[in-house]
Amino acid sequence: MTLSRSKEQDTAKNNSFHPTRGIFWAVRTRILCWYILFMIFIFIIFIPIFREVLYTRVDSRVRRELAEKIETF
């Protein structure tokens, strides 16, 4: 009786552990997914902001230099 009970307990323990849950549960895969999401976030948010800041700085510098050239002309 104890032998069959321990087999049942072992089977219950083995059923609670699912090694075939899928590849997403691997730590490497989750880290890779977070890394990809972070890179997408960087590309979507910070690159357009950085571009706009650079465009504004260049535009203001060009307008300032153009005003100086017109003034000296």
Image: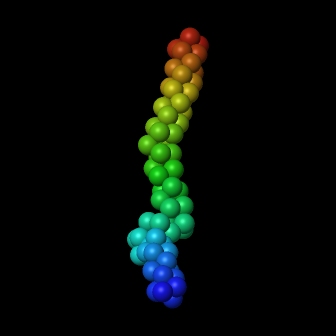
Q: Residue at x 49, y 77 (%)?
A: 9
Quarter assignment of residue 15: bottom left
Viewer-proximal residue, 31 or 39? 31
Whether residue 4 appears in this view of the structure is: yes
Q: Position of residue 47 (x, y in %)?
A: 49, 41
Query: How many numbered marks does the figure carry?
Result: 0
Q: From this view, report whether residue 32 is shown above or below residue 7.
A: above
Q: Residue at x 54, y 33 (%)?
A: 54
Q: Residue at x 56, y 11 (%)?
A: 71
Quarter holding the C terminus is top right
Q: Position of residue 4 (x, y in %)?
A: 46, 86
Whether residue 69 appears in this view of the structure is: no
Quarter assignment of residue 60: top right
Q: Position of residue 70 (x, y in %)?
A: 52, 14
Q: From this view, report whether residue 63 is shown above or below residue 52.
A: above
Viewer-proximal residue, 31 or 48? 31
Q: Residue at x 46, y 70 (%)?
A: 16
Viewer-proximal residue, 16 or 18? 16
